Amino acid sequence: MTDVVMSPNIVFVVTIAALFTVGTYLVLERSLTRILLGIVLLGNGTNLLILVAGGAAGAPPLIGVQSDRPMSDPLPQALILTAIVITLGLTAFLLAMAYRSWQLHRHDEVQDDVEDRRIVRLAAIDERAFEDDDTESGGETLDEEAATTRDEMDEGLAFEDVHAEPAPDHPGRAARPSTTTTDGEEGR
Amino acid sequence: MTDWSWLVPLPVVLPLSGAGLTLALYRRPRVQRVVSLVTLTLVAVVAAALLVLADAGPVVVEIGDWAAPVGINLVADRLSALMLTVSSVVILCVLIYSLAQGREDGERFAPISIFHPTYLVLSAGVANAFLSGDLFNIYVGFEILLAASYVLITLSGTTERIRAGTIYVVVAILSSILFLVAIAGVYAATGTVNLAQLALRLPEIDPGVRLVLQSMLLLAFGIKAAVFPLSAWLPDSYPTAPAPVTAVFAGLLTKVGVYAIIRTQTLLFPGGQLDDVLMWVALATMLVGILGAVAQDDVKRLLSFTLVSHIGYMVFGVALGSQHGWTAAIYYVAHHITVQTALFLVVGLVERFGGTTSLDRLGGLAKMAPVLAILFFVPAMNLGGIPPFSGFLGKVGLLEAGVELGTPLAYALVVGSVVTSLLTLYALIKAWNKAFWQTPPEPLPAHRVPLLMVVPTAALVVVSLALTVFAGPLYGYTERAAQTLSDRTYVQAVLPDGQRGEGESQRAADEDVEAGTAPQDGGEG
């Protein structure tokens, strides 16, 4: 153990850095599908990190195998295997959620906390005497309000576009205008 | 003395097997109900037995007879056993409540065939996180319970639940990734993930690296425990789930995070480097959380904010870094699990009775449903810290420990926790006045509330009162638990000679030594 120099492979380090950078960027997106991709990248970066944490590669750590070289550490590999399985399961679940969100709203955007919006609006009412978009209050409950709240409005897409091209196989394309077809039954 | 250590894995094994069984029996909801009920009752009994056993010293089980640092082990010390017992009682009560609700509402409540297996998996995950003696196994426990919670929070996939669930799931996954990165760091620095061995090795590594590892673990656990400023996900996501699910989440999930914070702070990083930071965080959590609660007009959201706020008390106790602080923190966790769950269950009943949880629309419940009024009033006063309830006792313990420390920051927290306590009382009294005393703006529907849903709620309220009546013995127990944490009996129990536990690999190593072929024990690295 003493003469094994613990300096990780530079290729690994660069790959991990790249995965974490891209993953972090994607997680900050609005669309759940992109967030999901980000999570997958972050998960894989973490797996590589655990591998690097286990030290340099070596001979296979099998009972009965004799080798002059130092053996690999089997524990990180077991940890990574567990982590991969967990990430796989969660990826499947998130995909299902993104699809369900698409079914219901025709978008898979992760929305702002409605509470935050309400506070912003109350503050606006407090500060200003005139009416604008922020001061209007429908007297709805949070639940009712949440259904109509959207953050990313892509004005470039007209409403008829949605009907012309239902595209259920592109749930990743976020930023569609929310149509008033409340239930996603249409086009299913 | 009989060896009772075989009991330790049961709280994990039983619900997992039960989950498999209920999944296989998805066509027969009646049998599913029986299986869940029997399993969780058994778990509660086992947990109570462990509570008694662990008082004599930590009970250690080495899975597959592999000795400690090589194999995975489960440890039930006083802290774990107490957490386990309280949580299994709560889980059982909520199960009975949801059974009654499921019988009333049928598939409108939840797809029963999915609910039971998931609920059992959740219970197994919680038990695994409490019992695990291995950092990675804690991660696995977290993942088990979180995966189950993702399913429960999005049950039936309605618009509202998908919206709130998305945020919850993404935040939880990110905290898990952070936890995993921290584990990788810990392993790179020390070459082990066994808690007891970590306790021996972490003091030897570079202090700077240790501080980084500690902050990463605290960050990951802080998200799970909903500590300010990492708490924003909680008040929005919890209230949308079905009442029993919200109740069990509020009672248990954040407390698993708090448990992990207690464990890492006391066992792995006992020096108390980050205690000051934790104190500030605790203060902010208490105040911001309770100010959020005061502003709410929906009972469920109000309770979610008090949940966040009261996590601050537990972090305060942990951050005091003294035995008295830990004692009070552990007692407070036990108190808060029962009271918060009871309150959410009562609100579920109120919603059922009045058809809404909005304080503007509710009213006159004290006259129309006096039983509900009592069931709400008692835990509400308890949470607010009115003597002689357990909430008061826990807070007094924390205040005493804070004054004992005597630093300006500790005094600031003492003042902060008193203010928080008063504001909690204010928020809850406001809720009480509006929902129970004011004349309802329009007549409430006054639906029938099934007796079987009232009984488990009442049972939890009684349990929370029992925490008051038996506060003496219980406080003694938590005091001994804190004692165990500070004198590090844990390490002794897992690694008797400081090297390995007792198990197959120890015997193999002994044989190797005798045969003269000892492989150098370079510590798994």
Image: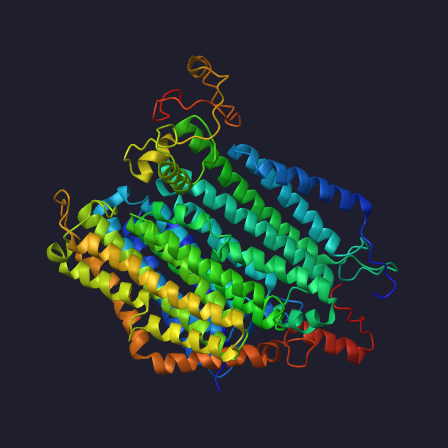
* A82 or B517, nearer to the observer: A82
Q: Is residue B43 at all visible to an observer of this figure?
A: no
Please say if B102 is above or below A182: below
Left or right placement of residue B13 versus residue B297 in this view: right
Q: In which quarter of the image is the C terminus of chain B?
A: bottom right
Q: Quadrant of residue A147?
A: top left
Q: Which residue lies furthest to the bottom in this view?
A: B1
Residue B188 coordinates in the image, percent (x, y): 73, 59
Please say if B43 is above or below B514: above
Please say if A80 is above or below B255: above
Q: Is residue B417 at all visible to an observer of this figure?
A: yes
Residue shown at 37% from the left, 71% from the top: B45
Residue A2 coordinates in the image, percent (x, y): 85, 66
* A108 or B52, nearer to the observer: A108
Please say if A79 is above or below B47: above
* B483 or A124, nearer to the observer: A124
Q: Which residue lies furthest to the front in this view?
A: A129
Left or right placement of residue B508 versus residue B92 in this view: right
